[in-house]
Image (cartoon, helix red, strand yellow):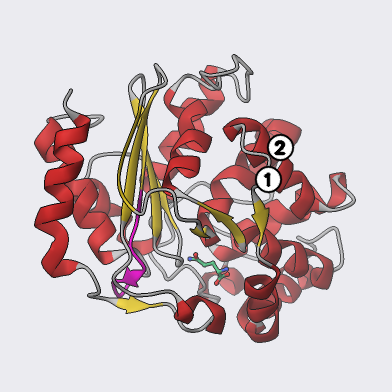
Amino acid sequence: MDYAGILEKIHVDLQPWLGKGRVADYIPELAKVPADSFGMAVVTTSGEVFRVGEADTRFSIQSISKLFTCTMAFRLLGDALWQRVGREPSGTAFNSLVQLEAEQGKPRNPFINAGALVVTDVLCRRFVKAETAVVEFLRRVTGEPSIDYDMRVAQSELAHGHRNRAMAHFMASFGNMEMPPEVVVDAYCRQCAISMSCVELAKAALYLSNGGVVPSTGERILDSSSAKRLSALMLTCGTYDAAGDFVYRVGLPAKSGVGGGIVAVLPGEMAVCVWSPGLDKNGNSLAGVMALEWLTTFTDQSIF
Ligand code: GLN
């Protein structure tokens, strides 16, 4: 497959779209990122790396962290995790509170904020510093020891994170928080503030393309059945309430973040990450979704 040529073509075709959409500004620190930034990387399970644009520039991974925290919590709890968080698409915005009351404080899935807060609660219970455990997990699966979170982004979100605090306290009122909500929100904002590049994120997600095993080291992160299940959740819930449209257009399991990154996996073949900070109305990277749609179209590869 000529990934190099196809990435070049996508970069050229995408020019008119770069800078379109809205850079997230509800976390003020994120609004400082140039709107027309763009990078994309494909990493194959056989270890080849293809990149275009600013594929080595680090950006704020935000909700893409939910994929890795969910992996860690699933490793710890297995199916017991689903007693506290569901597995259905929400059909509401990633930071919505409305379903929580009707559903007694049990979030729909681990990839919306409420569900990710429950997942982080699981990690806070197990690790003294959950965010450090997440950073260490990412360093290990990528082999990049300099990965870390950006304190300014974390503090910026903490200073404005009223909705996430409200959610954590609300779930606590239903008995679905084991640790103090403030501790969980603090760890959550730090995990969202981790900075990584497209190449690093594609490498990090590669265990999901490879039956749960990191191809470069042979380390088993998940058994193959759990890798299948997490990928299925990405497909149905990974891009918030746009998951239906996303899978129609792209045809890959994926997880997006308001930093403008999207990671997607093609089992048995590769992981891809695209970054462009302008977001569509659902909070997914506008040019990023387009780039992934073109990738699966030009390569004629998807899970379908
Ligand atoms: N840290 C962000 C928040 O909680 C993450 C949201 C996202 O990337 N969709 O609002």
Left or right relative to 2: residue 142? right
Image mark for residue 83: 1
Pick the residue in front: 60 or 234.
60
Eyeballing the image, is 117 above or below 302? below
Q: Residue at x 52, y 70 (%)?
A: 99
Would you say the beta carbon of the disc 1 residue lies within 8 angstroms of ligand 1?
no
Q: Is residue 186 left or right of residue 215?
A: right
Q: Would you say residue 265 is visible in this rendering?
A: no
Q: Residue at x 47, y 67 (%)?
A: 94
Residue 9 in the image, given as x and y percentages of width and height: 11, 45
Task: Say what amino acid the circle numbered 1 marks.
Answer: Gln
Asked if the stretch drawn in magenta spans residue 234, the answer is no
Q: Position of residue 127 (x, y in %)?
A: 86, 46
Identity, as a three-letter code, of the amino acid under mark 2: Ala
Dot 1 surroundings within 10 Å: few (below 14), some, or many (20 or more)?
few
Give how far across and how far down residue 73 sits, in percent: 70, 41
Image quadrant in which you'd find residue 178: bottom right
Left or right relative to 110: residue 33: left
Is 277 colored magenta in this rendering? yes
Per the image, label 1 sits on a secondary structure element best described as helix
Q: Which contiguous range is marked in magenta?
A: 274-282
Residue at left 9%, top 55%? 13
Residue 136: x percent and y percent? 73, 41
Mark 2 sits on what residue? 80
